[in-house]
Amino acid sequence: MKHLSETFDVVVCGGGLAGFCAAVAAARHGARTCLVHNRPVLGGNSSSEVGVTPHGTAAFHAYARETGIISEALIEERALNHAEIYENGWTNSVWDMVLYDIAMRTPGLTLHLNTDVKGVVMDDSVPATEPEVSAGLGYFHRPSSYRGKRGRVLAVLAETQNAEVELRLEGRLFIDCTGDALIADRAGCEWRMGSESREEFGEVHAPAEASADTMGNSIHFLCRDMGRPVPYHAPEWAVHHEDGSFFYDQGRLPKDERGGFWWLEIGVPHHTIHDNETIRHELTRHALGVWDWMKNRDPKMKERCANYALDWIGQVPGKRESRRIIGLHLMTEIDVQEKVVFEDEVAFGGWFVDLHTPGGLLAESSEPTSADGTYDTFNEYAVKSYCGPYGIPLRSLIAKDVDNLMMAGRNVSATHAALGTVRVMGTTALMGQACGTAAAHAIQHGLGIEDTTSGEAIRTIQQQLLRDGCFLPNIPRADVRDLVPSATIEASSVHAIRGAGPETTAHHEGLAIWKDQPQYKLETLETRRGQLLSIGPEGIETLSLCLSNSSDQAQTLQAKLYALDHIWDYRIASLEPLGETVLEVPAGVDQAWIAWENLNLPGVSPDEVGRFLRIDVLPNDALTWHSSPAIVPGHTGFYQIGEDQMRRFASGLTLSFQTEPAQSVFAPEFIQREAARPHRRTNLWCCDPGDEAPSLTLRWDDPQEIDTIELTFPGHLVREYHAYAPFYRDAQTSADYRVLAKDASGNWESVVEVRDNYQTRVVHKLAKPISTRELRIELLRTHGDPVKSLYEVRCYGPE
């Protein structure tokens, strides 16, 4: 056996998306970082070994897609990959290699793949013992005698598979991204596993009694179209199905002949850690049995599956839940549902409270939102589980029992109910990047990791996350080193919008609606409907909607107008209308513009330009409010699901509206304000569609020394990753652009020239610093949209 000892600043254990983003972030910020992972490929549940597609907040909230390192990777994957995304199991090695390539190009990052962590070396302050079970509480945890004791991890002991190499990996900070909380458990940390009682925290999704129940593990299978009928005979040991009610009456819909299916899941009565191999075997039996049913007996799928053959079956179970480490703050469902604002917010989430039925295939039905087979967004469970976007505190990513241990992924400090929403991979990737960024800051400034959760330290970390492309719902841009806020901005033109209608030209090739996501697509006004619009200095005199009346009588339509706090302000009853009216819709009209005249809404001040309003119309099922094929940035539709709860309509569509006069709500000043996405304002500069050579010019009173220019283009935000086609390059993103600086003699010099870009965030470190009073950004070509635009510009001088 060969023995090696290596020393790092940060040691990240676990190479799923949380661990990957943590390691890359720490290394990019100057920390000597090691990522140790027990599989040959990165990505964890998203890798080609498991094949679970990364989900996130944009599945439910328009313009809420995760950005930062995870966005960089997913944009790269879509631009390079021929594979279509569908429910699960699609992942091929292109995704694996995208992650591997990013890791290989990250200075200061050492990878140890195919390497198992076997133990943890602690200092002498905390003895290591085996976990105990508290029968009275019904879930696992460390005994109370350990509470309040703190120690430090000195090293992790690991062994490289098939290489006879033992490793001692020493570090100053450790990040547990193992999912099963392997490092925290060995370090003596308190943890929970199972479901808290409703009484403990008052969570609406918690069961009446605490239990050891967890969500289960899954495997997936894929099938290939052979172009001719092919038989399939299941082995004798596979599960055999004769009764279709197991599928169609219990929320297990075998709806895609290519495979996938999240509901191939088993947990209780098995232990999701210790019985992992038993679960793998049982899932294999069930997966083969499901394909046998679809192929040979399913009346709905048999014909569709005739030409398909089994191509791949996963043998690495993807886990949803096991140990959850107790941190400095335990996130509960109350934090999520009430959108609690944390001083130390470092990430965000917004997937619904998605708690799968314990037992999975062994239970009477699948998880509640699909159990009736319709994904009804109006049922009680769907309404009460819709949540976010909400912030996540750094304190939930720091173990309370060990001085130098952080965590990211499904093992963070959260209750079982809160885990239902924070566990999805888009969210865990953000938590990982936050951990890596905070760890690097602590090391560089000689701080304990707990010291980073308040004061100047947390403000610096938050601003660094924003600079690195992340988004924080409650933290605006305020980077004191950024030179752009002190500049005056001049644009060659500004796009003033009137709205969009059924005839408006769309530029969204390759952007689809993911068919497996619950949608409410009906344009008939069976429920209350709403549409976001933004207001400029012009004010709104008339607001029109494109409607049809299918009846032979004139119809009335009640309409109300509200001012919103932000783009995800879903309130109804608790908002006071700015105005209300009754619209008259003549009998038999088809796609007619019906005007709310004499609205006379005054224009807003420069600081308020681009803020959001919402026009709501009450139900009238004789009427149709038509959507537009064009998506106006930030302007999405809503529909009512609860008494005081709206929800995004379809996948972020714009319902047809027009304002008179046109509104100048895409101002150039937005490139230096709030956020790089629609939020409290539109936050986007758009040129006029007729401007063939659009540019932005930044001017300072005094010369500025600049060595880094960072740009954020629009694209990839409105919908979840699943909506994007193979080889996708977002039509809004600038493909060709250049940056010029004016020298002391008044001449323009090109300092950046780029062709065929498809990333939304680009960073240009100049070969040498420049000194200038004026900088010009010229947008030369997009990937299809005639309107060229920018969310954000940042400029920095030398460190």
Image: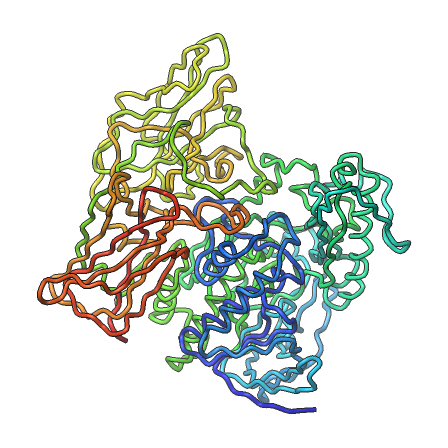
Q: Which residue is drawn at 38% across and 58% down?
A: 761
Q: Quarter of the image holding residue 672?
A: bottom left
Location of residue 452 in the rendering, given as x and y in whole percent from the top left corner: 41, 72
Q: Is residue 230 above or below residue 8?
A: above
Q: Residue lying furthest front in this view?
A: 228
Q: Residue lying furthest right in this view?
A: 236
Q: Residue at x 19, y 57 (%)?
A: 698
Left or right of 138: which side holds 659? left
Left or right of 68: which side holds 278? right
Q: Could you tell me if residue 387 is visible in this image?
A: no
Location of residue 516 in the rendering, given as x and y in whole percent from the top left corner: 61, 42
Q: Residue at x 52, y 79 (%)?
A: 110
Most foreground residue, 470 or 397: 470
Left or right of 113: which side holds 458? left
Q: Which residue is drawn at 36% across and 66% down?
A: 464
Location of residue 762 in the rendering, given as x and y in whole percent from the top left corner: 36, 61
Q: In this view, does 412 lie above or below 611?
A: below
Q: Quarter of the image holding residue 692?
A: top left
Most foreground residue, 697 or 417: 697
Q: Residue lying furthest top in this view?
A: 552
Q: Could you tell me if residue 569 is visible in this image?
A: yes
Location of residue 623 in the rendering, given as x and y in whole percent from the top left corner: 48, 19
Left or right of 437: which side holds 512? right
Looking at the figure, which quarter contains the N terminus? Answer: bottom right
Looking at the figure, which quarter contains the C terminus? Answer: bottom left
Q: Quarter of the image holding residue 143?
A: bottom right
Q: Is residue 352 above or below residue 750?
A: above
Most foreground residue, 354 or 326: 354
